[in-house]
Image (cartoon, grey):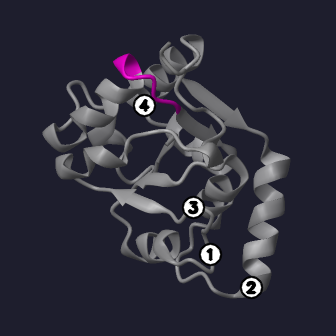
Amino acid sequence: MCVIVDANLASKVFGDPAEKDFSPVIDWLVDGGGELVIGGHLATELDRLGNCRRFVRALRRAGRARLIPETDISEEKAKLKETGLCVSNDLHVLGLVRASGARTVCTLDRNLQRDIRNPQVISSPRGSVYQRRSHAHLLRHTKSCGRLPKRRR
């Protein structure tokens, strides 16, 4: 899947070097055909962090980061707000998840984790949370993120 990195983990993921638990994310983004999804308020948050800003810009230049339009995210945020199902205050991240089709989020925010795993909030397919090295199996593409690996002949 395409991956979204929440601002609360960005310095650990995009640090130089990345923390041990997040090196699979960097390896997947740089050498494994991965794609970082950014947009809206999250893009602004990541841009404020020096190491993150440089890394995200390098990923965008390499075609490994996709920017989702703010209008798409806002539309999903409004739908989520109407439901009243969310326990986190990160509607901007959840809106990005829904607008982009990305279903793997790197975050330590427990309330956001609950929302991502709630099938009433994120479904088809359900969301998953990457927190440690043992979650490397979550780094893959599916139909929902719109970027499947090319088949070998």
Q: Which mark is residue 125?
A: 3
Type of the residue with mark 2: Thr
Type of the residue with mark 4: Cys
Residue 138: x and y in percent read 36, 49
| Up-down relation of residue 99 to residue 84 (above or below) | above
| Up-down relation of residue 112 to residue 31 (above or below) | below
Question: Where does label 4 land, which residue?
Answer: 52
Distance Cα–Cα, label 4 vs label 2: 33 Å
Distance Cα–Cα, label 3 vs label 1: 11 Å
Looking at the image, do the residues carrying marks 2 and 1 touch, with CB atoms under 8 Å apart?
Answer: yes
- What residue lies at 81% left-to-right and 50% top-to-bottom? 72
Q: Range of the magenta residues?
A: 30-35
Distance Cα–Cα, label 3 vs label 2: 19 Å
Question: Where does label 1 land, which residue?
Answer: 121
Could you say which is closer to the camera, residue 133 or residue 110?
A: 133
Q: Is residue 33 found inside the magenta-colored segment of the image?
A: yes
- What residue lies at 50% left-to-right and 39% top-to-bottom? 141
At label 1, counting other C-alpha atoms closer than 10 Å, the crowd grade (few under 14, some 14-19, many 20 or more) is many
Type of the residue with mark 1: Val
Distance Cα–Cα, label 4 vs label 1: 28 Å
Looking at the image, do the residues carrying marks 3 and 1 touch, with CB atoms under 8 Å apart?
Answer: no
Distance Cα–Cα, label 4 vs label 3: 28 Å
